[in-house]
């Protein structure tokens, strides 16, 4: 079971109060992009064993979207942070680096 | 808004009640409004706090004043409760006060159902805790706490007006489901004594 801290309403809830919205920090390619970039945006998702970054929605709570960094094996939550960002905050990355030295997720390490 | 000219509305279950090891009772029809917009906006704050006759609630809290209440629902949403007798007057005042298109309100009086769980404080908390993944312990869920969550499989919210009482609100379309859950949770013989 995951315990998530919603950064929008301050509630610590368990995962059935939330809904996962898939991989985080995906660059949305528009009509001007080439086929490879659009394919990458549309279809290519990582499915890591370990550190992962996801979008979550507090669906049975405040209704807001936010981001979560977690470990898919241990179900540890490294941090939750606002939806309005394209990269995890440095303090969340520091927490992960301390617990999982040398971790790499896409271009984030 | 044909309801304004028709017969007075009735609560979803006609005021159903159940006496188990705590009492479950549907609340009488009240007036209820969802207010949305920038919660730091003076127009929204002034209208909401004046109509409920309370101070602005903080995050996760409800400000109570008799049958009136103002609850913090999300970073851009408030829930306003008032007696049904004031329904028309509140509608008129919200209409006049919130003319900024970025500040929205909607009358949800007949879109919701409300229940009260009452009895010994520990048992009231326990019945709520059977149905929602929320910490209802006296130290976490204090008087004035307001918590949106799920009740069984549907959305709902809980607040604590004081010891021995927890109020529940859900969508009217699931009133019977929620009442059945509450009634089952309060069935004599099913006490857990989690907080007692
Ligand atoms: Zn939330």
Image: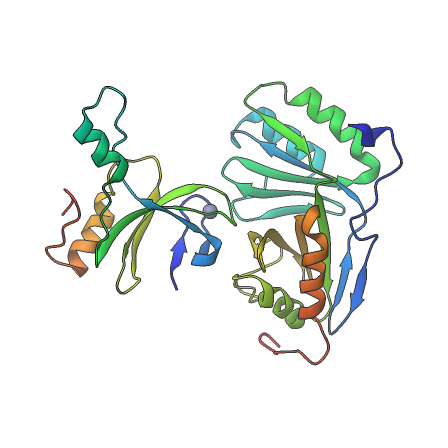
Judged from this view, the residue extending furthest toward the left is A102
Residue B166 sits in quarter = bottom right
Which residue is more in the foreground, B106 or B164? B106
A56 on left or right of B136: left
Q: Quadrant of the N terminus of chain A?
A: bottom left
Q: In this view, does B143 lie above or below B31?
A: below
B127 on left or right of A40: right
Q: Which residue is drawn at 73% across and 58% down?
A: B116
Q: Position of residue A26 (x, y in %)?
A: 26, 37
Residue A70 sits in quarter = bottom left
Q: Residue at x 53, y 32 (%)?
A: B39
Q: Position of residue B48 (x, y in %)?
A: 65, 33
B137 on left or right of A6: right
Judged from this view, the residue extending furthest toward the right is B7
Figure label count:
0
What colour scheme was applied to this rendering of the protein? Answer: rainbow
Q: Which residue is drawn at 62% across and 77% down?
A: B196
Q: Position of residue A108 (x, y in %)?
A: 16, 44
Q: Residue at x 72, y 49 (%)?
A: B113
Judged from this view, the residue extending furthest toward the bottom is B189
Q: Is residue B50 above or below residue A3?
A: above
Which residue is more in the foreground, B180 or B72? B180
Residue B84 sits in quarter = top right
Which residue is more in the foreground, B31 or B16? B16
Is residue B163 visible from the viewing direction of this image?
A: no
Q: Where is residue B77 in the image (x, y as percent from the top left)?
A: 56, 37
Is residue B56 visible from the viewing direction of this image?
A: yes
């Amino acid at each position: 079971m995951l315990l998530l801290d919603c950064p929008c309403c301050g509630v610590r809830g368990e995962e059935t109060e939330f809904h996962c919205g898939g991989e985080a920090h995906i660059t949305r390619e528009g009509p001007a992009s080439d086929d490879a970039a659009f394919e990458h945006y549309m279809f290519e998702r990582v499915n890591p064993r370990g550190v992962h970054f996801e979008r979550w929605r507090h669906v049975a709570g405040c209704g807001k979207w936010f981001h979560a960094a977690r470990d898919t094996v241990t179900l540890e939550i490294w941090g939750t942070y606002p939806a309005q960002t394209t990269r995890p905050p440095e303090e969340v990355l520091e927490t992960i680096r301390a617990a999982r030295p040398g971790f790499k997720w896409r271009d984030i390490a | 808004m044909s309801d304004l000219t028709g017969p007075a509305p009735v609560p979803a279950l006609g005021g159903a009640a159940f006496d188990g090891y705590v009492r479950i009772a549907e609340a009488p029809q009240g007036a209820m409004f969802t207010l949305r917009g920038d919660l730091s906006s003076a127009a929204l704050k002034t209208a909401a706090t004046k109509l409920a006759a309370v101070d602005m609630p903080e995050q996760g809290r409800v400000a109570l004043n008799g049958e009136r209440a103002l609850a913090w629902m999300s970073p851009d949403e408030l829930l306003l409760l008032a007696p049904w007798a004031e329904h028309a007057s509140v509608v008129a005042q919200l209409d006049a006060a919130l003319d900024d298109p970025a500040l929205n309100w909607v009358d949800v009086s007949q879109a919701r159902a409300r229940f009260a769980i009452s009895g010994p404080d520990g048992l009231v908390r326990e019945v709520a805790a059977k149905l929602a993944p929320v910490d209802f312990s006296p130290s976490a869920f204090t008087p004035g706490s307001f918590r949106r969550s799920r009740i069984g499989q549907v959305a709902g919210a809980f607040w604590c007006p004081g010891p021995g009482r927890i109020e529940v609100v859900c969508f009217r379309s699931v009133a019977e489901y929620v009442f059945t859950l509450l009634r089952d949770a309060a069935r004599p013989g099913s006490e857990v004594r989690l907080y007692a």
